[in-house]
Image (spheres, rainbow, N blue to C red):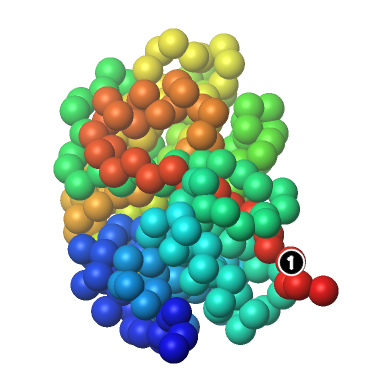
């Protein structure tokens, strides 16, 4: 008897309590998707803006998740990213640990929100990200970025944030960066809170983001902003057996 079965995204959402990671993943509703035999491990595919499969996301107890991923991975294009709970026993190359965060309510007011606005100066955003966050997941010109927010003072861009929302009702923010000379002024939480507030006002019922696991300052900041969902994940590549 197989240890997994194909299923639909509505079934996965029912199994996981309408998990915000599933809801917010680009193209997740297109399938394919699977559930483990015990119903505790689920897996589904994410897509890029061109409609190509870019990731296999699996959630559940580590051992059951590993079994499910190993069973279905061969059905997908080679070289796609695998995203699993941290500690899942899989042979992943180039692993990266990060946390998925989600907030279901508007954040408390932050000191510099009045200075935030939408920003169309992509050259300035590129310069700031190159200086502060060269490993960021979003850049100007990336088709997954809907728009940028920024804080400018005296003609300089001191903070930026990307709106990378990919699904109705689930806001997503990325590439949050603050110039070293402007740190300690509350710009990081302010630009994040400002964007969250606008996403909730536009009809989102949850706002999500990803943060590297070793970013202790960021994790604490998101706690203060009301990100109550905190899921430890690992992304990597899994080669097919020779």
Residue 181 lies, with reference to residue 97, above or below; the image says: above
Q: Residue at x 29, y 43 (%)?
A: 229
Count of numbered marks: 1
Q: Which residue is most to the front?
A: 1
Whether residue 162 is visible, yes or no, is: no
Left or right of residue 80: residue 49: left
Residue 191 lies, with reference to residue 53, above or below; the image says: above
Report the residue marked by disc 1.
239
In the rendered image, residue 134, in percent from the top left (x then y), is placed at: 68, 36
Q: Which residue is drawn at 36% across and 84% down?
A: 7
In the rendered image, residue 203, in percent from the top left (x then y), is placed at: 20, 59
Left or right of residue 122: residue 63: left
Residue 107 lies, with reference to residue 206, above or below; the image says: above
Quadrant hosting residue 155? top right
Q: Residue at x 68, y 63 (%)?
A: 238
Q: In this orientation, which residue lies closer to the viewer: 115 or 222? A: 222
In the rendered image, residue 105, in percent from the top left (x then y), is placed at: 17, 43
Q: Which residue is drawn at 36% across and 25% down?
A: 221
Left or right of residue 239: residue 236: left
């Amino acid at each position: 008897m197989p240890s997994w079965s194909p299923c639909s995204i509505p079934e996965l959402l029912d199994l996981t309590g309408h998990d915000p990671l599933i809801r917010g993943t680009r193209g997740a509703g297109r399938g394919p998707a699977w559930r483990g035999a015990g119903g505790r491990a689920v897996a589904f595919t994410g897509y890029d803006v061109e409609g190509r499969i870019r990731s296999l996301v699996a959630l559940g107890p580590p051992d059951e998740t590993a079994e499910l991923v190993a069973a279905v991975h061969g059905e997908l294009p080679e070289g796609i990213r695998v995203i699993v709970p941290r500690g899942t026993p899989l042979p992943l190359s180039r692993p990266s640990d990060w946390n998925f965060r989600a907030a279901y309510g508007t954040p408390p007011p932050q000191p510099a929100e009045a200075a935030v606005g939408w920003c169309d100066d992509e050259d300035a955003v590129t310069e700031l990200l190159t200086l502060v966050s060269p490993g960021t997941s979003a850049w100007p010109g990336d088709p997954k970025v809907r728009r940028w927010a920024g804080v400018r003072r005296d003609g300089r861009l001191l903070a930026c944030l990307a709106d990378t929302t990919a699904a109705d009702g689930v806001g997503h923010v990325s590439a949050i960066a603050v110039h070293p000379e402007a740190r300690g002024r509350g710009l990081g939480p302010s630009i994040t809170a400002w964007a969250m507030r606008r996403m909730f006002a536009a009809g989102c019922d949850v706002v999500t983001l990803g943060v590297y696991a070793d970013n202790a300052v960021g994790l604490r900041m998101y706690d203060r902003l009301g990100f109550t969902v905190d899921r430890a994940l690992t992304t990597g590549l899994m080669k097919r057996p020779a």
